[in-house]
Amino acid sequence: MKRVVIFLLTNIAVMAVLFIIVRVLGIDGFLTANGLNLPMLLAFSAVMGFGGAFISLLLSKTMAKWSTGAQIIQQPRDANEQWLVATVRELSQKAGIAMPEVAIYEGEPNAFATGAFKNSALVAVSTGLLASMTRDEVEAVLAHEVAHVANGDMVTLTLVQGVVNTFVVFFARIVGYIVDRIILKNDREVGVGYYVASFVAQMIFGVLAMIIVAWFSRRREFRADAGAAQYMGTPTSMVNALARLGGLAPGVLPKSFAASGISGGAGIMALFSTHPPIGERIRALGGQITQNGGPTESNQAFGRGAPAANHGFGRSAR
């Protein structure tokens, strides 16, 4: 969730800066000076749309580190950090990618992977997650994030974002032109009606675009879950980790994860959720959920009380 939110917010910020530049340079007026030139408008929209998305991608690691305060593990300071780095190294070798940077940040249970390129990625986990899960569960979460990197999900998301950005810009300006020239009967240079209408239309189309991007993100989550199961050699640990995330197993995580946005949204907000509901993800891995909402006995190895001290992953002091 966090990597997608950071990417989307960065994309919005970059697009806003680009549109300020467009306004200052008067490019909108040039496009509509002699009527609406659709081929030129489409080309302009593609440059703006994909430009904003790819700039966001290139800034993704920097923005992620800055926004979370993630601390890169340059030299492991204790056994837990050594295990974390060694586990990511082993998983990345299985995935056929270069060793990502590994980071820890303070916060509620969460984890994310980001980066413009497979071989220069970042995998980060929160202290809340490390303190709340067994090592098997943490390893499954790490495998899930490494799978995102190996699958090229950030690049895929960028391409999808670029396409929807393009259509948002394109159709917003068509709406602005229609309002300004046809409804308001403005036959002079681009008027206030054009800017107001195109801005409002862009906001509305932008919301619809977020739904499309979120849908693609949910599809990629299923692939990352499957990849994690493959790297782990069994889906059991991934099912256990997902059950823990969704509050299906004993523990005190549900409220924390709801606040972190890791589990799927409810009602109309489900359309904007970047992650599918936990139950759907478990079922996709072949796990079974009992009628009372807990995992089946075969998936409950971690669920008989709190994680033992020699199995849990301790909180790293920072």
Image: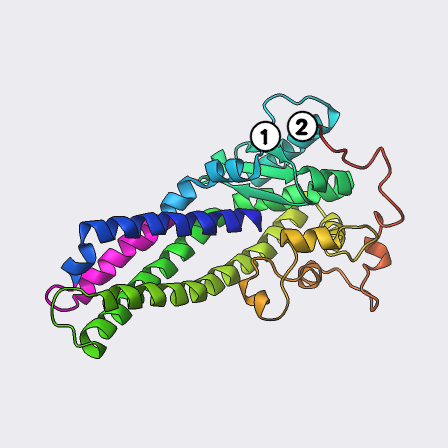
From the image, tell me which residue sits under label 1: 71
Element type where label 2 sits in the image: loop
Nearer mark to the viewer, of 1 and 2: 2
Q: Can residue 81 be seen at all in this image of the molecule?
A: yes
Q: Are marks 1 and 2 in contact (CB under 8 Å)?
A: yes
> What numbered label is drawn on residue 52?
none
What residue do we see at 20% from left, 59% from top?
28
Quadrant occupied by the C terminus: top right
What residue do we see at 78% from left, 64% from top?
289
At which x and y percent is residue 43? 23, 58
> Of residues 33 and 139, which is closer to you in this image?
33
What residue do we see at 44% from left, 67% from top?
208
Q: Quadrant of residue 278?
A: bottom right
33 is within the stretch colored magenta: yes
Element type where label 1 sits in the image: strand
Q: Quadrant of residue 171?
A: bottom left
Q: Which residues are magenta?
A: 32-53
Amino acid carrying mark 2 in the image: Arg
From the image, tell me which residue sits under label 2: 318
Q: Can residue 156 be seen at all in this image of the molecule?
A: no
Answer with mark 1 or mark 2, whichever residue precedes in sequence: 1
Mark 1–mark 2 Cα distance, whole angstroms, equals 9 Å
